[in-house]
Amino acid sequence: MKKLVILFLALSLNSCHELQQVVNQLPQGSVALGNDQIAAGLREALDKGIETQVSKLTQEDGFLKNEAVKILLPEELQKVDKTLRDIGLGSLADEGLKVLNRAAEDAVGEATPIFVDAVKGITFSDAKNILLGSDNAATQYLTSATQTQLYAKFNPVIKNSFSKVGADKIWSNLITKYNNIPLTKKVNPDLTDYVTQEALNGVFTMIAVEEKEIRNDASSRTTDLLRRVFSLQD
């Protein structure tokens, strides 16, 4: 009997040793993921948002036919739009709206590398809290950390895009016609500033769409890093 007990203990100890070897080879859980790795996962999620969602905005009608980001007329121009339609110039009003969105589509295509570089440079001071935050917490962090810098880089791109797609001439013609209508108050809004801000809002909106998808749909986590990091918030 004593020999059997000794044999059992020997087998148990040997089994424990083998079991520990197996455990050591298993993928490590949340305890093995430090702030740097979580931050890398968040950056990868934002990169995926740019690649998957923002790229859609660069296509023709990427803004115009996407109700989530479509650029509408600023408040001071809505009366211009209504007045032109009331006097039979609806097609001109439609064209004016279209070129605003065309300028944004063109500019996002040219400025996408700016967003990619911005994401690479982000340092998440508290990556774990961002990971465990709201569905768009990483996008909100990107917005607050980069919006001022991105605006400064984005604005001249928008201005150039206005010329490229003919928006400047169309709006000059449109506003001239409106200002020539008797009894109307003259308008001359800064459309470059307005479209720049709206285009940026559209980009951040679409990045947030992808972030939410990654957070809530495990099949959207297409790399090992995304799977490891975002499994922590499931």
Image (cartoon, grey):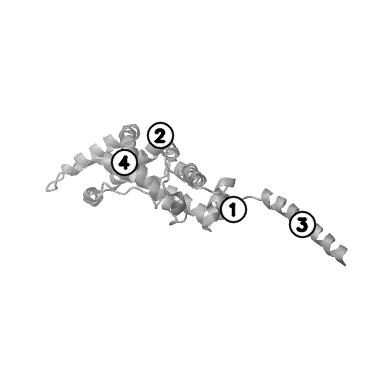
**Pointer 2 with pointer 3, Cβ within 8 A:** no
Which residue is the site of mark 1? 29
Element carrying mark 3:
helix
The residue positioned 33% from the left and 38% from the top of the image is: 149
How far separated are the C-alphas under marks 4 and 3? 62 Å
| First in sequence: mark 4 vs mark 1 | 1
The residue positioned 34% from the left and 37% from the top of the image is: 154
- 81 and 198: which one is in front? 198
Quadrant of the rendered image containing residue 179: top left
Element carrying mark 2:
helix
As shown in the figure, which amino acid type bears the numbered disc 4? Thr
How far separated are the C-alphas under marks 4 and 1? 37 Å
Is residue 64 among what the camera can see? no
The residue positioned farthest toward the bottom in the image shown: 1
How far separated are the C-alphas under marks 1 and 3? 26 Å
| First in sequence: mark 2 vs mark 4 | 2
